[in-house]
């Protein structure tokens, strides 16, 4: 039986809801739901195109500011061909605000129209002469088959379940997802008060440290960005990479600095919720 995706909200080109509301998306994300996004646009080359995509990272600030990140995508011309050379196209998709994007090269050559030494960041992707790419409508779909099995604070003290629950789920063949509280706070501009948020990322590899009594998991690729509402890139202040997430609250980041294309490794602590499917 094919699991049905549920349409949670539709918005027009002004990003105002035409069906449902953003709170429905926010509530689904808080419960660990996966998100898919539908849009339409009419490029001169082909006419009407309908596009659907799955978002590998989801995030929520409040009932209005919610959405997802596309983290595995290469830029493609309406699915007809690749363009811009080998690169990763990182997108911030906000239910109730415009799309923002950043291109990071994979071949060591600066991006076309780079905003710095290497990458290209565009918070106004479909303004002006790019209006043909502006969607007339967007649909947001959710699918929630996830069960929250463990929650703990930044020191690993559980309020729900335990690391053993995560261990058992992994040994039963379950896929895991983490909801990380305030993951992006270290990107907050100095002097600003950090905004409360939660970021959800699926895990790809798990490690049960049976004798040491903790559990760790590697996430799928994601990127870290400054927390703000509405979401957007702050120049080149973002960091693509992977996270190693542990039930003792520790998270190691292995991330790329877009301004230098150098890799960095850091540790932080966060409250984490663990989901299984």
Image (cartoon, helix red, strand yellow):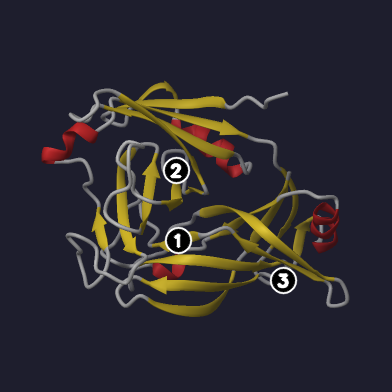
Name which residue lies at 46% across and 63% down: 184
Question: Does residue 130 appear to the left or right of 224 in the view shown?
Answer: left
Secondary structure category for the residue under label 1: strand
> Tag 3: Cα neighbours inside 10 Å, few (<14), some, or many (≥20)?
many
> Tag 1: Cα neighbours inside 10 Å, few (<14), some, or many (≥20)?
some
Q: Which residue was labeled with disc 3?
A: 248
Q: Is residue 53 above or below residue 251?
A: above
| Residue 6 % position (x, y) | 57, 25
> Tag 2: Cα neighbours inside 10 Å, few (<14), some, or many (≥20)?
many
Q: Which residue was labeled with disc 2?
A: 67
Please say if the residues under marks 1 and 3 sit with CB atoms less than 8 Å apart: no
| Residue 115 % position (x, y) | 19, 64
Q: Is residue 34 above or below residue 159?
A: above
Q: Which residue was labeled with disc 1?
A: 223
Q: Residue furthest top?
A: 19
| Residue 236 % position (x, y) | 29, 66
Q: Is residue 137 above or below residue 270?
A: above
Name which residue lies at 73% across and 23% down: 1
Q: Residue furthest right?
A: 211
Work out whether residue 190 or residue 143 is closer to the camera in this orientation and state it.
Answer: 143
Name which residue lies at 56% across and 41% down: 29
Q: Residue furthest front?
A: 81
């Amino acid at each position: 039986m094919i699991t049905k995706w549920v349409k949670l909200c539709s918005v027009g080109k002004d990003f105002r809801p035409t069906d449902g509301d953003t709170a429905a998306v926010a509530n689904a994300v808080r419960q660990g739901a996966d998100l898919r996004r539908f849009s339409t646009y009419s490029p001169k080359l082909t006419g009407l195109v309908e596009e659907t995509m799955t978002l590998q990272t989801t995030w929520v600030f409040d009932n209005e500011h919610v959405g997802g990140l596309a983290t595995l995508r290469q830029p493609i011309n309406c699915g007809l061909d690749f363009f811009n050379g080998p690169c990763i196209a990182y997108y911030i998709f906000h239910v109730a605000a415009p799309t923002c994007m950043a291109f990071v090269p994979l071949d060591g050559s600066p991006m076309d129209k780079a905003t710095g030494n290497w990458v290209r960041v565009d918070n106004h992707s479909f303004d002006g002469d790019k209006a043909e790419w502006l969607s007339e409508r967007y649909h947001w779909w959710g699918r929630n088959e996830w069960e929250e099995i463990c929650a703990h604070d930044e020191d690993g003290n559980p309020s729900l379940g335990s690391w053993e629950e995560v261990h058992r789920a992994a040994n039963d063949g379950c896929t895991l997802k983490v909801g990380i509280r305030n993951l992006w706070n270290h990107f907050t501009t100095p002097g600003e008060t950090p905004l409360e948020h939660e970021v959800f990322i699926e895990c790809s590899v798990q490690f049960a440290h049976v004798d040491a009594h903790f559990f760790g998991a590697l996430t799928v690729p994601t990127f870290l960005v400054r927390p703000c509402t509405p979401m957007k890139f702050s120049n080149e202040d973002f960091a693509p990479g992977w996270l190693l997430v542990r039930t003792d609250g520790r998270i190691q980041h292995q991330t790329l600095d877009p301004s230098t294309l150098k890799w960095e490794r850091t540790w932080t602590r966060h409250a984490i919720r663990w989901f299984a499917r």
